[in-house]
Amino acid sequence: MENSALPPHLAPLGPLLALVLACAFFASQSDRFLSAQNLSLILQQVMVVGVIAIGQTLVILTAGIDLSCGMVMALGGIVMTKLAADSGLPVPLAIACGIAVTALFGLLNGLLVTKARLPPSS
């Protein structure tokens, strides 16, 4: 039997309730928390994790666990940053190169899982 403060039909709303309470707390502590600039910054920071979560969700739905998703995403970010900042490559081209590198590693991972029958929990 599960010991939960919420009734069973409201249990899925627990994380949403925690988010609302956290937002209310931080809004009461600072008048800048609910500003457009702060909410934009939060959205920019959460976006990277959200993209990884979407990819990882697809992996989990196919009955696998692939721990390399975050690593490949980080590698793409490093490639983009190095090419744009250190090599002076135009930003759109650096972004395209970063996406190409991550796509190639994704293809390599996919081929290793499907053709070489390696488990996707790498």
Image (spheres, grey):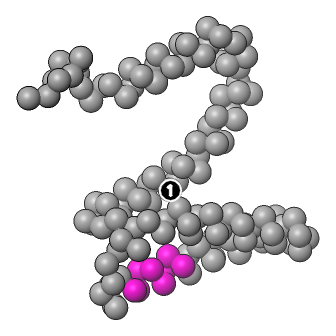
Left or right: 54 in relation to 10: right
As rendered, which of 107 and 11 lies closer to the eye?
Answer: 11
Instruction: Residue at 89%, 70% (x, y): give it.
Output: 86
* Quadrant placement of the C terminus: bottom left
Q: Position of residue 9 (x, y in %)?
A: 17, 23
Q: Residues within 10 Å of mark 1 (few under 14, many from 20)?
A: some
Q: Is residue 54 left or right of residue 41?
A: left
Residue 9 visible in the displayed image: no
Q: Is residue 63 left or right of residue 75?
A: left
Question: Residue 63: which quarter of the image?
Answer: bottom left
For this orientation, the residue located farthest to the top is 28
Q: Secondary structure at mark 1?
A: helix
Q: Going 78% across and 64% down the picture, which residue do you hit?
A: 81
Q: In the rendered image, which quarter is residue 18 located in?
A: top left
Magenta span includes 119: no
Magenta highlight: main SS: helix
In which image quadrant can residue 46 be found? Answer: top right
**Towards the viewer: 45 or 99:** 45
> In the image, 34: left or right of 92?
left
On the image, numbered disc 1 is attached to which residue?
52
Vertical position of residue 56 compared to residue 90: above or below: above
Seen in the picture, residue 8 relative to 88 is either above or below; the reply is above
Q: Nearer the viewer, residue 29 or 107?
A: 29
Disc 1 marks which amino acid? Answer: Ile
Q: Identify the magenta region.
A: 105-112
